[in-house]
Image (cartoon, helix red, strand yellow):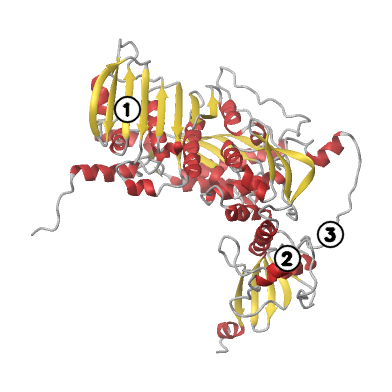
Amino acid sequence: MSRIKVMDRALANLIAAGEVIERPASVVKELIENALDAGSTRIAVKVERAGSRLISVTDDGCGMDSEDARTALELHGTSKLFAPDGISAIATMGFRGEALPSIAQVSRLTLRTREKGSPEGVEITVEGGKILNTVPCGAPPGSSFKVENLFFNTPARKKFLKSPGTEEGHIQEAVTLLALANPGVGFELDLDGRSVFNLPRGTMEERMRGVFGRQYCAGLLAVDHREGPLHVSGFIGIPGFTRSSRREQRFFVNRRPVDSVTMGRALRDGYATLAEPGRYPPAVLFLELPVDEVDVNVHPAKREIRFRSEFAVIRAVAAAVSSALRKWGAGGPELPEEEPELPEESDAAEPTPELPGVSDVSGASGPAAGMDGLLSSADVEYHVEPKNEQGELSFEEGGPFRALADTPLEHPRECSYDPDEAPAGTPAERAAEPPARETAAGFWPERILGIYDDTYLLAAGPDGLLLIDQHAAHERVMFERLLDSWRGQGGEVPAQGLLIPETLELPRGLLMLLERNLAFFRELGFDFTPAGGFSVIVNALPAGLRSSRPLGELVSDMLSGLLDENYTPGDLTAVARAACHAAVKAHDALTVEGAEELLRSLRRCRQGTLCPHGRPTMITLTRREIEKRFGRR
């Protein structure tokens, strides 16, 4: 008997739908792209329960008559591609005719649409790919799609959706990308009755301010560069304005949001030595090129593309970035006393004006932020001697390798400790805790020999050498201090109020994450107060949380870390891991005292050999391995 059979059509359709519709954000993206292809000037998106209950997308585009509406729900029903040679010249967002039938296959879909000039519209209801009814209806010109009970017939896919907060973040990012690519179209996003943004039609500068806020935009430079048929435009972060991940690097090809390794590499090449290792400047870059020079038909969701000439793209994007950075460095505008209004575009076509740059992007709103700005604005001269507090890591400048003093490490005594650094809880509670764990090789460093690249501590032990990652080690120390303090204080970390509360502006996605989890941040000693718009006031930080990093950068990285971890509300361990972004970074130059203090603190940790994210804090090179490398064994 034959074991190979042709798959049932209904099952095949479910599999095909899974390639296009991966999560609720995929539905939002596909419906908005259809609305853009229909010539819409206003698109409204409403979502309930992160898209599992309802996704509604309404536009004022050209609409459809009854026959076209039914055909659009059939697989590969399209108005954009009719001949094979059209595949190499695709200029629309959609073209395969897969999105609507794929959505209808895994949900209950209601479509209401009316052509402009038509006396009546049509309403079609589909469930699980089957058309239930088609009736005439009254409707405004355009189309309205209501998607309910998504993945009701594919429980496995519904089971593997992330937390509601994570799915909402993906939905918001999908709308944000398409809103950035189409400033001439108004966008409205509503999550569970809460208005996330309401963006009117306008210029690119107005759209950037509407999405990211004025303070964020003050740290960006305008890019405008032509090289043959390629045109690169958009905005990049000034040197020093960086993030901990590539999440805020957004690329567009012919106004299509894409994940492009090629453009990411070109962006990095354009910054050259101005890019801080391990940090990523934010960017919103648009590449315009002839449609036959790019293949968009290489990914089911059209997120990945292929260039005919990658070298030409890399050269053009890198040149655009480096040119903008050179102009800023040579003749950039002086930092204004007050944040100016960004210039508006005139009706005539002109190069995109530069957004004003800043020399220190710290999350503050200008040079008068914090104590330094307050005193300088009052023309008060002052000087503060640096204070090296017990337990605080100190820094110095050095070369690739710095030899340190030949003195043994002083291990902490059991009967003496610094109160600011001691684990929380009573002596009896601490005695019940597991002892500090030694390294995997069974020994601890006895003497620090030097520091390589201001990143790795080289230490000697009784049976070999150890390399300690200073960033990973400090992350582990801070992680355990925060959680120990939280456990010892009955579920709340003591907070240290700021002398002058600082106001920060955050991107909308990070601000929403913060607002949803204010109570949990408060338990770990962070006191934030939303101040309207993109602003949040930082009133207090956890006691003992010391960092040389700008506060705005620290908070942004902490929140981005939570998004990268698919944070679940109530997961205090994830918050503590994210707070470890305050740790010393690679290339921060530690002094002898700072390096020794770091190792003493690491020794007191319960799991000193791993950072909070699971990476090793140190690796060992035994005497036997060294002798084997030199051919002595």
Left/right placement of residue 71 relative to residue 435 reads left
Marks 1 and 2, how far apart in space?
62 Å
Residue 243 appears in the rendering = no
Element assignment for label 1: strand
Mark 3 is surrounded, within 10 Å at the Cα level, by few (under 14), some (14 to 19) or many (20 or more) other residues, namely few
From this viewpoint, which residue is outermost toward the bottom?
633
Residue at mark 1 to residue at mark 3: CA–CA distance: 66 Å
Which residue occupies 58% across, 84% down? 630
Give me the residue at 77% from left, 37% from top.
369
Mark 2 = which residue? 426
- Residue count near mark 2 (Cα–Cα under 10 Å), binned few <14, some 14–19, many ≥20: few
Alpha carbon separation for disc pair 3 and 2: 28 Å
Closer to viewer: mark 1 or mark 2: 2
First in sequence: mark 3 vs mark 2: 3
Question: Which of the two discs, 1 and 3, labels the residue nearer the N terminus?
Answer: 1
Q: Secondary structure at mark 3?
A: loop
Which callout, 3 or 2, points to the residue nearer the camera?
Answer: 2
Work out whether residue 131 or residue 469 is closer to the camera in this orientation and state it. Answer: 131
**The quarter of the displayed image where residue 609 is located:** bottom right
Contact between labelled residues 2 and 3, with CB atoms less than 8 Å apart: no
Residue type at mark 1: give it.
Thr
Q: Quadrant of residue 50?
A: top left
Label of residue 632 in the image: none
Q: Classify residue 61 as left or right of residue 611.
A: left
Quarter of the rendering occupied by the C terminus? bottom right
Residue 388 is labelled as 3
Judging by the rendered image, the residue that carries numbered circle 1 is 110
Q: Position of residue 485 (x, y in %)?
A: 70, 58
